């Protein structure tokens, strides 16, 4: 198994969960400097930039989840 498989799987699960809430983060991806580095820690997931509408949708989804 590729050492970054867990990070890639997590990224895809995050993308799917966001899409299920109508949220798209166009810059969502694996942080390339941490992916390419020889660190023992797994690479970081870069949430990236988004517009205000996407940020508001994310806020709404997180608040809804917090109220459960």
Image (cartoon, rainbow, N blue to C red):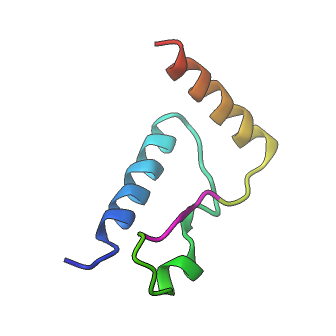
Residue plotted at (58% across, 27% down): 61
Residue most extreme to the top: 67
Q: Which residues are magenta?
A: 42-47
Quadrant where the N terminus sits is bottom left
Q: Nearer the viewer, residue 11 or 51?
A: 11
Q: In the displayed structure, would residue 52 be above or below residue 47?
A: above
Residue plotted at (62% across, 53% down): 25
Point out residue 12 in the picture as x, y percentages from the top left corner.
39, 57
Point out residue 9 in the picture as x, y percentages from the top left corner.
33, 60
Total labels drawn: 0
| 54 lies left or right of 42 | right
Point out residue 28 in the picture as x, y percentages from the top left corner.
58, 61
Q: In the displayed structure, would residue 6 be above or below residue 19?
A: below
Residue plotted at (72% across, 40% down): 55
| 11 lies left or right of 27 | left
Q: In the displayed structure, would residue 33 be above or below residue 61?
A: below
Q: Nearer the viewer, residue 47 or 54?
A: 47
Residue plotted at (45% across, 87% down): 38
């Amino acid at each position: 198994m590729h050492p970054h498989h867990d990070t890639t799987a997590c990224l895809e699960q995050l993308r799917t969960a966001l899409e299920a809430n109508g949220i798209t983060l166009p810059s969502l991806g694996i942080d390339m400097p941490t992916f390419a580095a020889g660190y023992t820690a797994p690479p970081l997931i870069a949430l990236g930039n988004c517009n205000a509408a996407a940020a508001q949708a994310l806020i709404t989804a997180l608040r809804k989840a917090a109220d459960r």
